[in-house]
Image (spheres, helix red, strand yellow):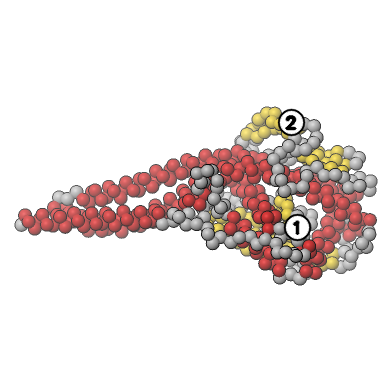
Amino acid sequence: MGIGSSDTGRASGHALRLVAAVTLLLSASVGCGTLGARTANAPSALGAPDGLPDAARLDVAVVAFDPGLPSERDDVYPEIRQAESAWLPLRLVKTLEKTEQWGATRLVPAEPIAADLVVTGEILESTGKELMLHVVVRDAAGRVWLDKNYRTEVPSDMSYAVAGDGSRPFDPYQPMFNTIANDMVAARQKRKLEDLERLRTISELKFAADLSPEAFGGYLATKRNGTVEVRRLPAVDDPMLERTLEVRVRDDMFVDTLRVHYQKLYSDIDQSYWGWREVSNQELRAQERIQKEQIVRGIGAALLVAAAVGAAASGSNGAYAATGIASAIAIQQVQKIEELQGQKRMHQEGVSELSRSLQTEVAPVVVELQSSSVRLTGTAEAQYEEWQRLLRDIYRAENDIVSDVYMVPRQPREEVVLADAELPAIVFEADEPGASGLPRDPTLPPVISPAVP
């Protein structure tokens, strides 16, 4: 009888150890299953082919994205989304510029008066692990080229890992921007060359009609489906049309000046935003592993209970040991998530602090007229709205024209607290007019441009 009891105890012990080993093995496989995945098959943005006609190089206006702030969710961080509403479209602008498939590609705070091609977007999901955007591309005639959701998922825990020399890997979000750029090219290829040329004409006439509806309102007609077509054309040497084209050059100059602000924001938040994405991705993956491991441990627990029946009769402590091992794994995972959450908060605070320039005033912009100077202040969107109103006034003033546009250099003077957001904001003291002195993209044209004779 004693021999049988001993055999039963040993068998039960073996069973418990086997169950514990299986549980540990399954847990380990769940925890490490996503490591090592890479983006080797990520699409590349298509460069411009040799001999691409100038008519195909349409000018593109990319509007700052809608941050998409759902009121019913508490896991969306407004400060992050506000920063992303400028960072993400500027990333798309840089991608489009690199392909050399298009003409001037600019980031604008709001819908422009007119553009050959307008890109708008809304952030549907952004967690560091997943990015989903709704992107719409329309041409000057109102025809929709693209209207679709784009989604990318970061492939692994290590996708944001920085190398020993400090260099970063391929940005996990870049494949999405490459795909959008390629889809825009594919949509353009479906259009005839004469249709693309007509878009530039429509864009010019829409801009002219906004400045002077009485003079140019009859050149375009809107069809029942909402698209625009050319009804007639002004004379090639029409002096009024030439004046609208001069004003439009100044409009482009102003938008290029605002890009200094966006480029500085992009550079300032880049490191903190990368860190936030990295730890957020790791945190979400750790939570997913815990959920999967709970299922595995549930199966293992059922086996342990069955094995423990025999172990209890022999007085074996294997059941308690196996249960303790499984619990230790769970505790380690929870501690890891808590650590990641702390890192995430740190990076989030960094992005929030640096992105205040989106929610507060940007550097004032001075518009030099032949007769006077106009100073635009406020947010980028407020300045852009005021600028568009100013353009109409300039056009109506027969003897006035913009001779220069530049951003005023600023130095911090004092710190105040915003009543609505309760965030510290910097109030700046203007220096003498001149070049902005802010970091800027070297591919941009000069901020201060010579006046047109």
Residue 265 picture location, percent across and down? 65, 43
User: In which quarter of the view is residue 412 placed?
Assistant: top right
* Residue pictured at 91% horizontal, 45% vertical: 400
Residue 103 circle label: 1
Compared with residue 408, is residue 72 higher up or lower down, i.e. above or below?
below
Outermost residue, left side: 1
Residue 429 circle label: 2
* Residue pictured at 30% horizontal, 50% vertical: 326
Front residue of 378 and 198: 198
Compared with residue 320, is residue 214 higher up or lower down, i.e. above or below?
below
User: In which quarter of the view is residue 18 placed?
Assistant: bottom left
Q: Nearer the viewer, mark 2 or mark 1?
A: 1
Q: Amino acid at mark 2?
A: Glu
Residue 275 picture location, percent across and down? 53, 44
The local crowd at label 2, few if under 14, some if 14 to 19, many if 20 or more residues have their Cα within 10 Å, is few
The local crowd at label 1, few if under 14, some if 14 to 19, many if 20 or more residues have their Cα within 10 Å, is some
Front residue of 380 and 52: 52
In the drawing, does residue 48 fall left or right of residue 333? right
Residue 114 picture location, percent across and down? 79, 57
